[in-house]
Image (cartoon, rainbow, N blue to C red):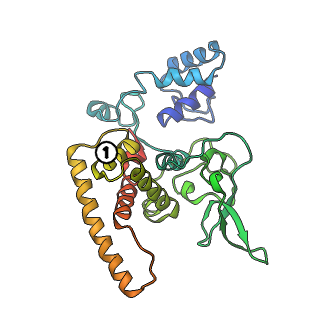
Amino acid sequence: ARVFVNRVWHHCFGAGLAPTLGDLGALGERPSHPELLDWLAGEFVSGGWSVKALHKLILTSMAYRQGSIHAAAQTADPDNRLLGRMRLRRRDAEGLRDGMLAVSGRLHTSMYGQPVPVAVNAHGQVVVGKQAKNGNGDPTGTDALGSDEFRRSIYVQVRRSAPVGVMETFDSAAINPNCEVRAVSTVPLQSLMLMNDQFVLDRAQDIAERLRRERPGDASGQVARLWVLLFAAEPTSTELQRSLAFLVEQTETLRSSASLAKEKNAKAPPADPSLQALASLCQTLLQSNRFLYVD
């Protein structure tokens, strides 16, 4: 019971009461709050080993509902071993992918069934999809899976030799041979992924189209709705004005680029600069710390 409770605590707070999740024995580190660990384990057992009740107990506690900014606690306890504040933590890889799908309106929430396959696309990146092959059996790209492509990440096939790129970049579990605690890194590749990966670009486009449907012809309403979707909060007046100014400037820039492209190629597809500008704003906010981190 202590081992299980400690793991649940780790996933809620970013660190276990006992740091060594795989060893609560003599060789592991002692818990920072042994009485709390004992009490939680007792409540877990007396509650019929209900994981849902355990989550409710932890998530409604004052310890969990603290903010991450507390100057005195940061000075006195930099590693936050005494739980004087919430530990700032980034969304895990699955949560980040599912979050982008959810705000874009694409998340497919059906349960059970076969795992969603992964494949190597034309750029050599592992993505969610069905593998397309040529006559020699060599991979040539991916085929669409329909709505299954947007299922929750827990249903995506895990292959040790082919981790999904967008999740591997954000420290998905290393299955070699098991993963007690995930590494948490901050590297330039993560920013490059958010700026250039097709999955992120598609989700930004989906969000922009969703905003157009829900708030047609209302730029201020679209920005306000975007803030609620991504941050569960209304934008401040400054944030609203800056976003609207960005949309105007970006629309003009894209309109000029579209005109030049049309002059060079009469067959170029018609572009919608205002929609593209809105998608650019959506992608920018998807890359923000406010969306990536839980504080």
For the point 61% across and 24% down, the residue is: 51
- Residue 270: name its quadrant: bottom left
Q: Residues within 10 Å of mark 1 (few under 14, many from 20)?
A: many
Residue 198 in the image: state x and y as whole percent. 51, 64
* Vertical position of residue 202 compared to residue 56: above or below: below
For the point 54% across and 21% down, the residue is: 37
Mark 1 residue element? helix
Residue 214 in the image: state x and y as whole percent. 40, 47
* Vertical position of residue 52 compared to residue 291: above or below: above
- Residue 65: name its quadrant: top left
Q: Considering depth in this image, is 99 or 43 the residue closer to the camera?
A: 99
For the point 63% across and 52% down, the residue is: 147
Q: Quadrant of the N terminus?
A: top right
Residue 151 in the image: state x and y as whole percent. 62, 48
Q: Considering depth in this image, is 159 or 288 the residue closer to the camera?
A: 288
For the point 29% across and 34% down, the residue is: 75
- Residue 47: name its quadrant: top right
For the view shown, which residue lies furthest in the top direction? 46
Query: Label 1 belongs to which residue?
Result: 224
Q: Considering depth in this image, is 186 or 124 the residue closer to the camera?
A: 124
For the view shown, which residue lies furthest in the bottom direction? 264
Residue 242 in the image: state x and y as whole percent. 23, 54
For the view shown, which residue lies furthest in the front direction? 217
| Left or right of residue 155: residue 289 | left
* Vertical position of residue 253 compared to residue 3: above or below: below
| Left or right of residue 293: residue 41 | right
Q: Quadrant of the C terminus?
A: top left
As shown in the figure, which amino acid type bears the numbered disc 1? Ala
| Left or right of residue 253: residue 139 | right
* Vertical position of residue 23 compared to residue 182: above or below: above
